[in-house]
Image (cartoon, coloured by chain):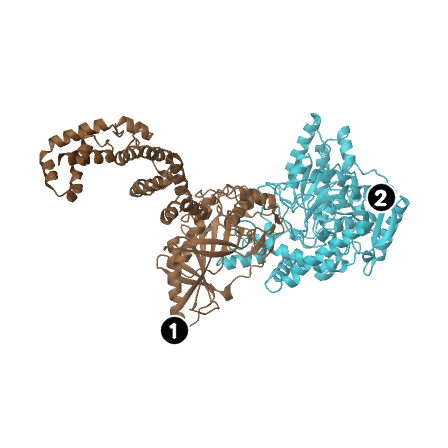
Amino acid sequence: MHDKTLAELARSLEAGEFSSRELTQHLLGRIDRLDGKLNSFITVTYDQALAAADAADKARAAGEADLLTGLPLALKDIFCTQDIKTTAGSRMLDNFISPYDATVVEKLKAAGTVSLGKTNMDEFAMGSSNENSHYGAVKNPWDLTAVPGGSSGGSAAAVAAGLVPAAIGTDTGGSIRQPAAFCGITGLKPTYGRVSRYGMIAYASSLDQAGPMARSAEDCALLLGAMAGHDLRDSTCVARGVPDYTEELDTPLAGLKIGLPREYFGDGLDPQVEAAVRDAIKVYESLGASVREVSLPHTHYAIPAYYVIAPAEASSNLSRYDGVRFGHRCANPADLIDLYKRSRAEGFGDEVKRRILIGTHTLSEGFFDAYYKKAQQVRRLIRQDFLDAFEEVDVLMGPASPTPAFDLGAKKDPVSMYLQDIYTIAINLAGIPGMSVPAGFAGSRPIGLQILGSHFTEARLLNVAHQFQQATDWHRQRPAFAEENA
Amino acid sequence: MQWETVIGLEVHVQLATRSKIFSGASTAFGAEPNTQACAVDLGLPGVLPVLNEAAVAMAVEFGLAIHAEIPEVSVFDRKNYFYPDLPKGYQTSQMYQPIVGAGVVEITLEDGTTKPIRVHHAHLEEDAGKSLHEDFHGMTGVDLNRAGTPLLEIVSEPDMRSAKEAAAYLKAIHSIVTYLGISDGNMAEGSMRCDVNVSVRPKGQETFGTRAEIKNVNSFRFVERAIAFEVERQIELLEEGGKVVQETRLFDPERDETRSMRTKEEANDYRYFPCPDLLPVVLDKAYIDHLRDNLPELPAEKRARFENELGLSAYDASVLSATREMADYFDEVKDVCGDAKQAANWVQGELSGALNREGLAIKDSPVSARQLGELVARIIDGTINGKAAKQVFQALWNGQGSRADDVIEAQGLKQVTDTGAIETMIDQVIADSPAQVAQYRDAEPDKRGKMIGYFVGQVMKASRGTANPQQVNQLLKQKLDALC
């Protein structure tokens, strides 16, 4: 049961092989038994999950089941959930219970899905290893000494370990794609504006985007269909119809033009990762695609530009955590300034503080033009690089991450951690969609192939990923951890 | 030394939208604390702003009213600072690309002269909540009902040269926003507040002196008093060899003085940057044209029309156009009675007198414009005379009858114009007043004019005020002179 994809589970539920309650109970049991070793969940919502499963079974009995009715999933703890704690992985929000549901949560509920709980993450989505969580690091189910990636590390690990068939993550600079690559699952970061950000705790507003993390491209297609769409509560969410993302999955790839960005295969790329990615490209060629090299000349500016823009927005977005209305408040503040200083000093972790400091500095008088404005100019150039490339090719392919999952505690220096996102970060700056698809292993650790498309081409990306998964079985590999302990 | 005062004003006008600028919560004033603050106003994690289109329309209307350029694109920026009544830790405002560009407001001074005051720009922003320091036993309470109320901040050039000009400018802004109906203009409730920038310089000097900013002055009177104090303080300081420091000051109306709040060195670095949660506001020409076509007549245009088209005096025109309520009332009286001068006389005379006596605003007048217009019409067409008209007005004011005609009918006030009937009354009065007739006859012809008043009074009394006074006068003169 815990091995199946959403699409397979949907067929089983429809065929009456088991009920949503049985499936939910089975998975909750696995979480109980296995998650102590992984730490992928911050909050497990047993009662709400079973109640939702019962409601789904009832709907099915009444002939009112939809495609996703009764299917379990998990939510990154960055989505506000009514009456359920929402922490963003931070001590600051350890006591925060949202009075409302995020739009994504509302939509998934309306689609009949059953949330098992809230998954672990880097604090306020700032990190690439899930080691920056107030609730402790998450382990990679493929190798418990490795990180699962971040910031959606809990979501990726839970799906890989067979605790839940799918999870929702968010991606600001690679936070869906990199953990999906590290944990051997399929993840999609949609076009900026495709999915509502309302109720998603903001890290960097102009880059944040929610997306599905699952065991197949088909499952991502099913989930994206339920999550996407216009939302009057988010001005940056685009008023554009939501297609049936499963419709194009089976379109043959003959004639597909693939571009390989020269800059994505340079220094610092692990040879095993490169080999796996090149093998995957060969698979595409065998499916009738043509491949050519392209250039994204401003790639090397992506990380510096990102680390100006994202911290600038974050420094402002995180100002509301001041100990006045909600969240952590220090004990016995002497006065207002003391309340602010100690509440924030105690409530935020080191990486969050680091980015608030960077952002505060880059926005300050005398530095704004040199940093923020310049970074926005660079951002436009990076976007233009992609638009130019998509004049020539349909999709771009490359590695999702320069290395496979690294060891827990291996990256002590923040800059070496930032460099992890070298292949993912530009995509957020450009606002285009990107996927990571399992494409091999380096020893026991998975490798992800990244597939990129121009704005609002999710259906095409999912088709390209799905066809690969029809021709390979990397996405069907399960870690021993999931089986041994079953 | 002769000093010149230089004043610039930043006026914050609360826009009269039903809901807040970035949320659906109500903007009504006076509710229980924190009952009109939704998740967005509270700045809860995950919430996002959505711009209220009504606030945009109102800002553009203001811009059009002051003949300002309306840029095609305007952008919201975040102004970052920590304060307990600022829930998000930033105020959403417009720093670099405001919605209203440069414009001009014409002010009228007490001697009737006008002066143009340039407006640098006007921008939209959200109001903060309120910190309450009383009743919390050494703690501070925060009320976020006001948080997110739309404000239009109107920033003038330093074009004013006296406290009186500053007050006149503020009144002109008040008049424009209330005419447009984009604000209730209620200063007591904080719907209009202003920051005053004041500096002095030796007369004839080109460069400006160092300015002080006086924050949050909330009445026309306080603006004048705060400036008067501040100008005196700065001149005294300079004449004693001191220097004015650039600082923010607070006006204390109780002690009638300004006090230093913070100097430039202590000022916040607000770290403005474009708000990534809001799209740039793009206004197309059709939208702006539509708003322009639907603008109401504004105070300056109204004054000009009253003076030029209706032939009112400059004074009458300015009094009657001072507020939209007054102007609308006058316009209706004039339309109903058909005579602008009579309408002006009655609105400024009998009506304003009665309103002042009872302390009523014109919108609360017991006599409606239609009622007054119908009454004046009856004077014009000769149905009643002026004396009877005052009686009718009093009756309408007291609610004795709903239309002038009904009152005239019920109280028998219709003017007697029948020459025969008037002659009969005159004959009777002459017959009853032999002594006065004798006096009249014996008087020098040039003294007789004054003496006729007695007879007129008697005839009017006999007619219970309804005889046509001109006819009475004329007939009396004929009859008395015939006796001489």
The residue type indicated by label 1 comes to: Glu
Name the image quarter holding the C terminus of chain A: top right
Name the image quarter holding the N terminus of chain A: top right
Query: Is A58 placed above or below B315 here?
Result: above
The subunit carrying tag 2 is: A
In the current view of this chain or complex, which residue is farthest to the top? A62
| Residue A351 position within the rendered picture, expressed as x and y whole percent measured from the top left | 66, 58
| Residue A103 position within the rendered picture, expressed as x and y whole percent measured from the top left | 64, 41
The residue type indicated by label 2 comes to: Phe
* B214 with respect to B436 (left or right): right
Q: Residues within 10 Å of mark 2 (few under 14, many from 20)?
A: many
Residue placed most toward the observer, A47 or A261: A261
- Write the residue at 59% across / 50% down: A93
Q: Residues within 10 Å of mark 1 (few under 14, many from 20)?
A: few
Chain identifier for the brown-coloured part of the image: B
Which tint was used for chain A?
cyan
Image quadrant assignment for residue A13:
top right
The subunit carrying tag 1 is: B
Helix, strand or loop for disc 2: helix
Residue for badge 1: B240
Query: Is A314 placed above or below A250 here?
Result: below
* A353 with respect to A2 (left or right): left
Residue placed most toward the observer, B257 or B13: B13
| Residue B232 position within the rendered picture, expressed as x and y whole percent measured from the top left | 37, 65
Residue placed most toward the observer, A218 or A248: A248
**Residue B21 appearing in the image:** no
Residue for badge 2: A468
For residue B48, the mark is none
Q: CA distance from mark 2 to mark 1?
A: 85 Å
